Amino acid sequence: MRILVIDDEPKVASFIRRALEEENYAVDVASDGQSGLDFAKSVNYDLIVLDLMLPQLPGMAVLQQLRAARIHTPLLILTARAELDQRVRGLDAGADDYLTKPFAIEELLARARALLRRGSGSSTEILQVEDLVINTATHEVTRGGQRIELTSKEYALLEYLMRNAGRVLTRPMIIEHVWDLDFDTFTNVIDVYISYLRNKIDRGRDRSLIQTVRGSGYMIRAEE
Amino acid sequence: MSIRVRLTLWYGTALAIILVIFAGIIYFVMAQALHDRVDAALQDAAQVAIRSLEDRFGPFLIFEDLSRDFPELALVDKFFQIFGPTGQVTIQSANIKSREIPLSQTAFQAALKGQATFESIRLRESIPFRLLSVPIRYRGRLVNILRVGTSLQPIEDTLHRLLLTLVIASPIAVIVSLLGGWFLAGRALCPVDAITLAAQRIATGDLTQRITAPTSSDEIGRLASTFNDMIARLETLFRQIRQFSADASHELRTPLTITKGETELALRRPRQVEDYRSVLESNLEEIDRMSRIVDELLFLSRADLGEIKLHWGPVQLDEVLAHIQQQVTVLGQDRGIQATLTDVTPTTVYGDELRLRELLLNLVDNAVKYSHPGDTIELSLNHMGAYARLQVIDHGIGIAPEEQPRIFDRFYRADAARAHANKGTGLGLAICKWIVEAHRGAIHVHSTLNAGSCFTVLLPLSSPS
Ligand SMILES: Nc1ncnc2c1ncn2[C@@H]1O[C@H](COP(=O)(O)OP(=O)(O)OP(=O)(O)O)[C@@H](O)[C@H]1O
Ligand SMILES: [Mg+2]
């Protein structure tokens, strides 16, 4: 899951980024409205966290331009103002949720999870394919009731596959949603991580869940 | 009791008292005049009769003769009686009829002494009479007493009617004038009600209210316009305060967000010691920022309320400037920024030395902060007319023309400044401006984006007498 954070206060942007990264999300940071808008238009993010008080291009304008460009990525606004009209205007302009600064980290993460869930059309924190179950809040992964330990990248990749269960995901799509901009794109890394995942999830089971779609990419689903 | 009721009652009472006194005087004067007229008429009649008696003096007086010669004696409204020297009636006019009106003792005694007597009597049928008894003497001897009398009934009737008129008319006049007074008081007080209504709406927090009532220059008009002025001032004051506290809470929210966020993040799971250390350091920085904001805000709000007193005295500006130059060496050490004194005229101004130092320190702090590493800052002091002119010149990032008017506003920070130096509250120049104005001076900026800025401070050379 890839998230864009737009905030001009470097310290704020930095701790939000670290918090999200600890949850295995890929995070990019833009420090002003214009670059935030450019990022959001060029990468297909799963969630945008937007501060309303930005120099040059205000947050509200970023939001309106995004929606005008038909980019409907779930969006969480951060505002220093608790005033009702600000929040209402933000929500009217197409934001999905808001948080008032200062906020609790856990609340930010919970709302981010809820928005990501909404984005992928599911309504619980539990994702399940056959007997493979992951809890997106605790990052617990089990198969057939057995706990499976994953590294954070492996988990991020699995969560992305599970959120899009039954759909073919190309390598560029996976890169975009699981790795952030700092990542040096050599697509081979995906195949490497897929094989790690297969080792931990499918090996020694009757049915393997991670499928290779020749010529296009990967997908997770129950084998017929 | 409302003012309207009170005004009306006062008015009514005063009018009632005046009416009562007035009616009393009218009644009294009228009664007096009427009685005087009766007495005069009686006297006239008596005189005529006496003259006629004297003409035909004799032991017997025939009334018929008298009335023939003097028709006025037979007037119906008067009667005559002539008493003998012992007080018994000898002759009396016919219109006295059978009424028995004897000569009173007082009149008889007065007649013996040769004096005339007026008397008022009331007969059994309660008809009031006025009587005049006049002695007729002949060679020093009382021969007869002539009495003329008339009924007072017409006068009493007139007076009675007058009294009735007054008793009925006065209350009506009072009632009518009470109504008029009530109406007039209401009209005069109507703007007061408007003011009260406006004040009530203002009390509920709506400071946009104004009194639309009279624009006249009377008492009420002045009250209304004074009231409007007051509300206008309150409104601006409230707007300033609201804006100020909104700004303040906004400025404090960022450091709070950072300290809260970083601390919570650090506590989510066990970390390395260095991680904790960097969080604590960062938090300390934010705490310093918050206490600076609070200090500066406190200064400015106390300044707004006029609570900051200047300690006036002569200030040797060239010495202050030399001291500031040394401070720049410390401030700019890390980034190799130096200050030079280009032109220093020895100058003494009258002011608060501590505040003037603070002013210059704020200016050079900005100059250092918004300069590039290795730059030089120029300081100068000279005279311009009646003013001492201080200049702080840097070759740093400069300020865009459209932003120049706003940099003296509280919390305002230019975009370029935010990008260049992250720390800063935007209160420094607001404080400078306050200090300069408290010294009756002026402060301006000349600046070119990406080339540098020049801040000029003018302070009056003469001491305020
Ligand atoms: N010498 C300068 N060069 C360029 N810009 C300046 C200079 N001095 C002031 N400014 C601009 O004016 C703004 C207001 O200055 P001010 O001193 O009030 O606030 P600050 O320096 O940002 O914060 P602080 O309250 O910490 O001083 C600055 O943010 C900056 O944009
Ligand atoms: Mg400053």
Image (cartoon, rainbow, N blue to C red):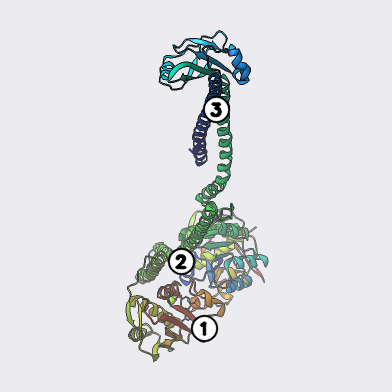
**Closest to the observer: B223 or A25?**
B223
Q: Residues within 10 Å of mark 1 (few under 14, many from 20)?
A: many
Asked if labels 1 and 2 touch by Cβ distance under 8 angstroms, the answer is no
Marks 2 and 1, how far apart at CA: 26 Å
Asked if labels 3 and 2 touch by Cβ distance under 8 angstroms, the answer is no
Letter of the chain that mark 2 sits on in the rendering: B
* Disc 1 Cβ-to-ligand 1 distance below 8 Å: yes
Q: Give the amino acid at mark 2.
A: Glu
SS at circle 1: strand
Residue B387, horizontal then vertical, whole percent: 42, 83
Letter of the chain that mark 1 sits on in the rendering: B
Q: Which residue is mark 3?
A: B37
Task: Work out whether mark 2 precedes mark 1 in sequence or the reverse, and give the earlier one.
Answer: 2
Farthest-out residue, top: B98
Q: Give the amino acid at mark 1.
A: Ser
* Disc 2 Cβ-to-ligand 1 distance below 8 Å: no
Q: Dividing the image into 4 quarters, which one contains the C terminus of chain B?
A: bottom left
Q: Which residue is mark 1?
A: B447
Residue at 44% x, 14% y is: B104
Residue A35, horizontal then vertical, whole percent: 58, 74
Residue B398 has which mark?
none
Between label 1 and label 3, give the one nearer the viewer: 3
Q: Give the amino acid at mark 3.
A: Arg
Q: Which residue is mark 2?
A: B251
Letter of the chain that mark 3 sits on in the rendering: B
